[in-house]
Image (cartoon, rainbow, N blue to C red):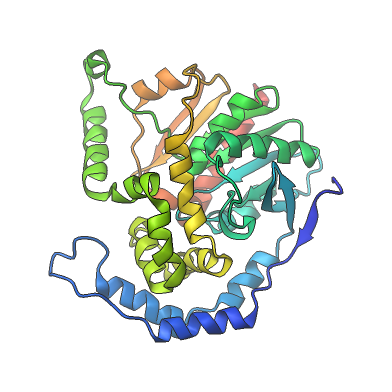
Amino acid sequence: MSSDITPFRIEIPQADLDDLQTRLDLARFTDELPDAYGVSVSRVRRLAEYWRNGYDWRAWEARLNAYPQFTTDIDGQRIHFLHVRSPKQDALPLILTHGWPGSIVEFLNVIEPLSKDFHLVIPSLPGFGFSEPTTESGWGNVRTARAWAELMERLGYDRYGAVGNDAGSMISPEIGRLAASNVVGVHVTQIFSFPSGDPAEFTDMTEEEQAAMGVLQQFWEEMGAFNTLHSQQPQTLAHALADSPVGLLGWNVQLFDFDLDDDFVLTNVALYWLTGTAGSSIRFYYENAKAAPQPAEPTTTPIGLASAKGDFQSIRRFAERDHKNIAQWHTHGTGGHYAAHLATAVYADDVRAFFAGLLKG
């Protein structure tokens, strides 16, 4: 392992936890009309009350610290990551990438089953969690993918797979594009391929494809405000998120489904709060929105989809335009957006089978 890599342990000062407790004690809640128009006061109140009187950060801190963690500087940015090696010395390494408002916590449940067969590298995105706030502009999908390729090289891995959810589903294919000779395959839970505007793309769409388009349209019309604000004025929102844990909770919980357990939701939110990365994390959207257009050539590294009902519904005809080597297309009946957490066995089996098929071939 490179000497530029430093062992890391999470040790949040008690003073920071005491300050959080005080802020939760003094929380002011907004009013609302019956239709709520967003995340309801009752949901935020309930989660805030559990955060005050039941949630145990130290227990989750200990769970995270049970796995080897490290930091390294890449392209001027501190990068934090878990690195869990398989007992199989010749196991294929995987780099697993989370999104917003998730974190490395997304993958905690799959570490044990996947590490039986794979070496796992699970980094915190630049500007997220213990990777600390970004110190300069430009940290979007492509720069992050380039940093991940450098991280894997620094760890001595010259042949590996890229796995992602949410933002990780955009970054992982870019790793395959940038390091095609090193990446054996890309496994994602969403393929974010959208209509280009060419009317021919809508010819003979199946009922299933039309339904997926309807889900996409409904999401952007009713839930897409976060993306617009993050992409246009993240700094304006950051002032509120940095000052109020309940405000941060209310904002981030809009993309945490109701079937997620409270501890999972609060650990993700607490991680942003305790590391001061609520504002820098949402800059990720701005960086991608303002980034120079990338070449339109499709990816050629084998890509596998493990979608879940209730999540973003990828449309294959658009995906095949952007990715010329789709090796797997699965839709599971369980899991939602955080499948690695909610449907751990199904997710782990899908990842394992995808890479086993590539290595066998």
State whether residue 357 appears in this view: no
Give the vertical position of 187 relative to 346 (above or below).
above
Q: Is residue 255 left or right of residue 161?
A: left
Q: In screen coordinates, is 5 left or right of 22?
A: right
Instruction: Residue at 56%, 24% (x, y): give it.
Output: 302
Q: Position of residue 314 (x, y in %)?
A: 36, 33
Is 199 drawn above or below residue 21 in the view shown? above
Q: Which residue reaches farthest top?
A: 200
Quarter the C terminus occupies: top right
* Residue closest to the eye, 228 or 262: 228
- Residue depicted at 53% across the width and 82% down the height: 19
The image quadrant of residue 26 is bottom left
Q: Residue at x 49, y 84 (%)?
A: 21
Callout count: 0
| Nearer the observer, 154 or 59 | 154
* Relative to 130, residue 245 above or below: below
Of 327 and 143, the residue lying toward us: 143
Q: Position of residue 242 (x, y in %)?
A: 46, 67
**Which residue reaches farthest left?**
34
